[in-house]
Image (spheres, rainbow, N blue to C red):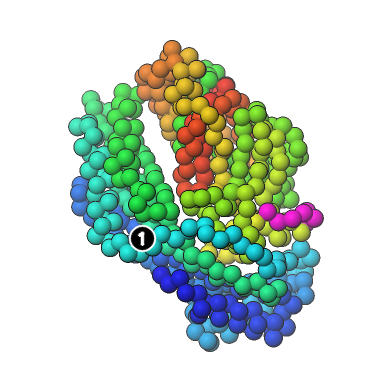
Amino acid sequence: MSGDFGREKDIVWDLVAQAQRRGARAAEAYFSEEEETGIEVRDQKVEDLKIAREQGVGLRVLMGRQPGFAYTTDLSGDGLVRLVEEALANAAAASEDPYQVLPGPAVYPENLDLYDPSLERTPPDAKVELALRLEQAGRSLDPRVRLTETASYEESRYRVVLANSNGLLAAYRGAHCGLSAVFVAAQDGDHETGFAFQYRTRYADLDPEGVGRQAASRAVEMLGARPITPRRATVVMDPYVAINFLGLLIPSFSADAVQKGRSLLADKRGRKVAGGAVTVVDDGLLPGGLASAPFDGEGVPCRRNLLLEAGIVSNFMHNSYTAARAGEETTGNAARGSFRSLPGVGTTNCYLQPGGEHPAALIRGVGSGLYLTEVLGMHTANPVSGDFSVGAAGRLIENGELTAPVRGITVAGNILEWLGAIEACGRDLTFLGSTGAPTILVGRLTVSG
């Protein structure tokens, strides 16, 4: 994947000029290209190997105050002419919207180290070998590990080029790679699964043996799991579980959700909703972050935003549109999945800030409670009301030690109640994709068997 953006810059710049010549008051062209590799192995054989590449360009225009948008994968001269015509026709049929604005040129951060050239240099055979090592490490950990559900390597390399009629012209490229595994352990008719993930921006930072052993260990440790009686319990959540709960809360920090009346936090800006140990950050410049970039989906420089600071709601995430509606400054959170979409509002690298304690110290301090390692059905939770009732699994905590595995339990409550009950955060900040959390101690949750 080339680091030379000459042709793509010409394309987006020419699209903006064409749109203006045809009567657009303002225009923005967004080019993106992505090449994905996926390798899945099972029983030490390659089961699936996919390499897919896609590129295209989206054009946003403003005819007066009427917005129009269109996209294409046809980058020929005729294809680009048709793209301009379609975007202008869509604008002509649209209603006026006074909040449609485009940002101006900016100075972008440099040296973000987003692209590891070794990903391009490493041949597919070596990446297959990485996935095989991952599976071998998991399957050989314990004879009770009987089945590989998933053992895979994934990679994405991408380029973005953006121009608008305010004189903005910018580009960058990035990449990330990752490993994931799910193993099944069996004993005396009981079958349990265990998973692990690892995503990095640098190929050399992947640890296939570590990921394989972690997934297998989680499966073996759950053998013999049983339900428990209903109770209000102190709960320690491992980072993966904490990430799931944080994922239910994050949409409420979107200014778009606030303006549409879909945010739990809409009337809570400046108010305390959690303890002093709780800080939520969205950092588009995080070193090593999978969603780090010099600019967002409409060319505004990315930055670090405090969303929840020491338990107080401090900020909402904006793109240019929501910022114009609110009379505020955009926070650089315009999110764009590809050239096919308009910029919405989304996170970059969003995480619950770690504390200073070792996870084992959090568990020792509980005395009696639950250590959750898995939640099921979080997608059924209501992001508007914040209510959740999800399946869960983990270990009992007795006398400050992890003991019997438990499964078939339900954890219920409200996400604001969860937030307010967080008493401490561990130091083991872990990311799953671009969302991260450490081990956390939640003072009270309703648990049923």
Instruction: Identify the image quadrant of the N terminus.
Output: bottom left
Q: Amino acid at mark 1?
A: Leu
The x and y percentages for residue 58 are 57, 72
Q: Main secondary structure of the magenta part?
A: loop
Helix, strand or loop at disc 1?
helix
Report the residue at 23% width, 27% height from top: 187
Judge from the rendering whether residue 228 lies leftward or rightward of residue 191; answer left or right.
Answer: right
Judge from the rendering whether residue 339 lies leftward or rightward of residue 228; answer left or right.
Answer: right
Label 1 crowd (10 A; few <14 / some 14-19 / many >=20): many
The front one of 39 and 409 is 39
Residue 20 on the magenta span: no
The x and y percentages for residue 159 are 49, 67
Give residue 21's quadrant in the image.
bottom right
The x and y percentages for residue 240 are 46, 37
- Is residue 410 visible in the rendered image? The answer is no
Residue 274's place in the image compared with 35, above or below, is above
Give residue 149's quadrant in the image.
top left
The front one of 210 and 188 is 210
Mark 1, residue position: 119
**Magenta segment boundaries in residue numbering:** 325-331
Report the residue at 77% width, 69% height from top: 96
Judge from the rendering whether residue 357 lies leftward or rightward of residue 87; answer left or right.
Answer: left
The front one of 444 and 230 is 444
